[in-house]
Image (cartoon, rainbow, N blue to C red):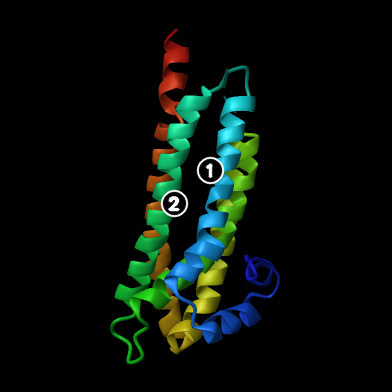
């Protein structure tokens, strides 16, 4: 369970080789990695928004009720799981022009592991100051990009130059997905609406 988390953070080159050799299934990936790690930002956001409250770092702090936060958390969790699938599909589409095209399952598995730093960065949502969450998200995204550029060539059995092209395409789509996810997060957790109401009031 979560056996590859430390390896991807500490020695990613070696870990990518091990992941490739395991021939994992999507079911196993979700059961032992994605479902658990994707819960980190959701649970932390739930605690943060109900106990601490969203803050811009000034005097305005907004808390959600337990019921509102629960509904938002469930929707947020489903969106994260869908985002992993979308990125996996993007990798599969980008890899079609290469001789050894990986299966859709392999691409989704790769996407699930490459998202690990983004999942972990969600820990800061337990104390949801907006600039802190954005900083953690940027750091998580940078390390995710590093894992992507490092892992794609060996995963697809292509050159580093070709891997750079596939990684860049995947990263571009991933950033768009992330932006959509962040926007949806703001809406789901009621932050935007409540800030506007508080400013108008």
Mark 2: few, some, or many residues within 10 Å (few <14, many ≥20)? many
Residue 66 appears in the picture as rendered: yes
Instruction: State which tag comes first along the sequence, 1 or 2.
Output: 1
Closest to the observer: 113 or 27? 27
Mark 1: few, some, or many residues within 10 Å (few <14, many ≥20)? many
Q: Which mark is residue 132?
A: none
| x and y, in percent, of residue 118 in the image | 55, 55
Q: Is residue 183 above or below residue 156?
A: above
| x and y, in percent, of residue 174 in the image | 41, 59
Closest to the observer: 179 or 36? 36
Q: State the residue at coordinates (59%, 59%).
A: 117
| x and y, in percent, of residue 42 in the image | 53, 43
Residue 169: name its quadrant. Answer: bottom left
Closest to the observer: 39 or 126? 39
Residue 93: name its quadrant. Answer: bottom left
Q: Is residue 189 above or below residue 91?
A: above
| x and y, in percent, of residue 53 in the image | 59, 25
Q: Residue furthest top?
A: 201
Residue 53 appears in the picture as rendered: no
Q: State the residue at coordinates (41%, 83%).
A: 162
Label 2 sits on a secondary structure element that is helix
Q: State the residue at coordinates (56%, 64%).
A: 32
Q: Which residue is mark 1?
A: 42
**Where's the N terminus, which quadrant?**
bottom right
Q: Which residue is mark 2?
A: 80
CB contact under 8 Å: marks 1 and 2: yes
Q: State the residue at coordinates (59%, 63%).
A: 143
């Amino acid at each position: 369970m979560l056996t590859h988390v430390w390896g991807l953070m500490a020695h990613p080159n070696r870990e990518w080789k091990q992941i490739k050799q395991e021939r994992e299934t999507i079911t196993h990936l979700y059961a032992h990695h994605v479902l658990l790690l994707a819960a980190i930002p959701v649970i932390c956001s739930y605690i943060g928004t109900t106990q601490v409250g969203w803050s811009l770092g000034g005097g305005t702090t907004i808390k959600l009720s337990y019921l509102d936060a629960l509904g938002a958390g469930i929707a947020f969790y489903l969106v994260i799981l869908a985002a992993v699938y979308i990125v996996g599909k993007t990798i599969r589409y980008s890899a079609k022009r290469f001789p050894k095209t990986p299966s859709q399952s392999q691409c989704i598995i790769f996407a699930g592991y490459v998202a690990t730093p983004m999942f972990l960065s969600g820990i800061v949502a337990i104390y949801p100051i907006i600039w802190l969450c954005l900083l953690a998200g940027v750091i998580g995204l940078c390390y995710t990009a590093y894992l992507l550029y490092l892992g794609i060539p060996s995963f697809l059995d292509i050159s580093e130059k070709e891997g750079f092209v596939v990684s860049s395409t995947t990263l571009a789509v991933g950033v768009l997905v992330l932006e959509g996810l962040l926007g949806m997060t703001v809406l789901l957790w009621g932050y935007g609406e409540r800030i506007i109401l508080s400013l108008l009031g």
